[in-house]
Image (tube, helix red, strand yellow):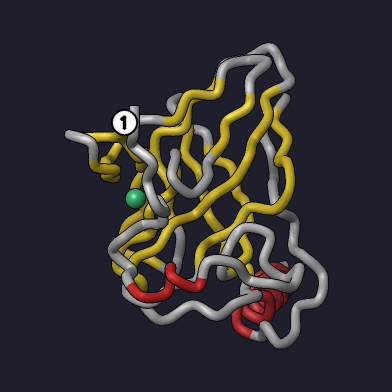
């Protein structure tokens, strides 16, 4: 039955290809999280649409199970590298820096958001398009992985109308820490 095995393999390959390439108006969201036990995605993971060849990715992941998790790496087909980053005040200036892992203890929620923890997509292969769904693979400390899909959009809650903060558009290197009030 060699023949039928090859046939089935071909079908599978063809459908995978179709799913990856033929992405006309994808009205429905793909599965946003093939979540591991106890984990649940809150809201929609998203990647910021911005000029340049790097950008940030964000999501909120709740751990309502009884197992601690730690995310140690990520990858995505859109970028050469995906790093785990945080924002931190260094000498009064908000800077990004790489972290070893993202902790997600049992009972807690991991929040990746602008100005805080985020995924950093570095070396984008081509410009992103708003509305695209990007597969992202998260790798955990125990070696397991988890696939999510993130939507490309200009800002958090994009698609709800009024974009705020046009001043962001000018400087892509200024990763959105806004006007810092550092009185007191
Ligand atoms: Cu970053």
Rendered residue at 50%/73% (across/down): 166
> Which is more toward the observer, 113 or 61?
113
Q: Residue at x 67, y 24 (%)?
A: 63
Q: Residue at x 63, y 64 (%)?
A: 151
Of 71 and 118, the residue lying toward us: 118
Residue 6 in sight here: no
Quadrant placement of the N terminus: bottom right
Residue at numbered disc 1: 100
Query: Which residue is nearer to you in this view: 183 or 124?
Result: 183
Name the outermost residue toward the left: 91
**Residue 119 in the image, given as x and y percentages of width and height:** 43, 49
Q: Residues within 10 Å of mark 1 (few under 14, many from 20)?
A: few
The residue lying furthest to the top in this view is 66
Query: Residue at point 69% right, 12% down?
Result: 66
Is residue 108 shown above or below 29? above
x and y, in percent, of residue 74 in the image: 43, 47
Q: Quadrant of residue 117?
A: top left
Residue at the far front: name it: 184
Describe residue 182's horizontal placement relative to residue 75 as left or right: left
Q: Is residue 98 above or below residue 173?
A: above
Decide: is 81 above or below 106. Answer: below
> Image quadrant of residue 55?
bottom left
Say which of 159 and 102 sits in front: 159
Callout 1: SS: loop
The residue most toward the right is 28
């Amino acid at each position: 039955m060699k023949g039928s095995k090859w046939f089935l393999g071909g079908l599978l390959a063809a459908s995978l290809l179709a799913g990856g390439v033929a992405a006309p108006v994808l009205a429905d969201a793909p599965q946003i999280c093939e979540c591991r036990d106890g984990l649940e995605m809150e809201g929609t993971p998203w990647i910021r649409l911005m000029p340049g060849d790097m950008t940030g990715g964000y999501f909120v992941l709740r751990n309502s199970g009884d197992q601690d998790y730690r995310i140690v790496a990520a990858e995505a087909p859109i970028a050469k590298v995906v790093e785990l980053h945080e924002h931190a005040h260094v000498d009064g200036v908000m800077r990004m820096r790489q972290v070893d892992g993202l902790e997600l203890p049992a009972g807690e929620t991991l929040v990746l958001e602008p100005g805080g923890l985020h995924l950093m997509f570095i070396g984008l292969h081509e410009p992103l398009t708003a509305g695209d769904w990007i597969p992202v693979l998260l790798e955990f400390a125990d070696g397991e992985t988890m696939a999510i899909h993130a939507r490309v959009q200009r800002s958090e809650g994009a698609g709800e109308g009024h974009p705020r903060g046009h001043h962001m558009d000018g400087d892509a290197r200024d990763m959105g820490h806004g006007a810092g009030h550092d009185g007191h």
